[in-house]
Amino acid sequence: MPRVRVWEIPLAAGDGNLGECVSYLDPRERTRMSRFRTADLQRRFALSHGAARVILAAACNLQPAELTFRAGQWGKPELADLDIHFNLSHSGDLALLAVSNDAPVGVDLERFPDTLPASALAGRFFLPAEATAVASSPGPLQSRHYVRYWTRKEAAGKAAGLRMDQTLRLPVASDCGSFLLTLPPAGGDCRAWVRDIPSAPGHLAAVAMLGPTPFDVSVTGWAPVGAEQPVREG
């Protein structure tokens, strides 16, 4: 069965690994980092992308600074000349990196504040059935339902390399935490399997893989120094 490994990367302030992560970045990544307006945003970028390089390099038997990235469809980063698939998402002080040797993957992580105007947003961005499902949910659950649908759409859209307007039209109002989704023709295989995955308190997350086959997933904590520590299983 295909498999996806999702790494949970902490981005909290005070991480002593920041300098090391910055040293792994290539000139283009450092330029992107410098464009963020605050030191806090620059730190999160460096930690998430530096950790991603460490994880991917270990999977490829390379050094982190040796990895070369290229832009795929709609700018989705890919590893040049290496048959490994990955996708990175971050929200606040946490990032997720999905990695697979089997097929293109996408992952999305979002926080869900209780004050989110979920019903209005769903009516603006989602399909009618999804907007109705969000609006008909009890008040405290509307934000959760909205963000759940959003993470599913983003994960599938990123796996396929879709534009945002295509991503928002993906039908994801399933009562199951794992389901098959039909994609627009631009999605290549035209199908993706989508799974909700466990996440940190106050967050929701989903991962998707191109193709019609269900996949196994594990969520593992990443520590800059020392052994990895599994924290959740999907």
Image (spheres, rainbow, N blue to C red):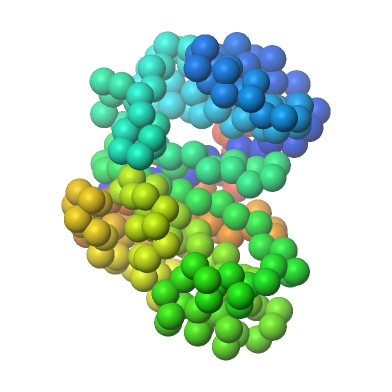
**Residue 152 location in percent, x, y?**
45, 61
168 in relation to 133, above or below:
above
- Compared across the picture, whether 90 is left or right of 139 comes to left
Q: Residue at x 53, y 56 (%)?
A: 205
Specify whether residue 184 is in view.
Answer: yes
165 in relation to 80, above or below:
below
In which quadrant of the rendered view does residue 39 lie? top right
Specify whether residue 227 is in view.
Answer: no
Q: Residue at x 69, y 83 (%)?
A: 139
Front-most of 212 and 142? 142
Q: Residue furthest right?
A: 14
**Residue 36 location in percent, x, y?**
67, 29
Q: Residue at x 69, y 60 (%)?
A: 202
Task: Count all numbered tags in the image, as a single digit.
Answer: 0
**Residue 125 location in percent, x, y?**
49, 67
137 in relation to 101, above or below:
below
Q: Residue at x 58, y 60 (%)?
A: 204
- Compared across the picture, whether 8 is left or right of 207 comes to right
Front-most of 18 and 168? 168
**Residue 42 location in percent, x, y?**
68, 27
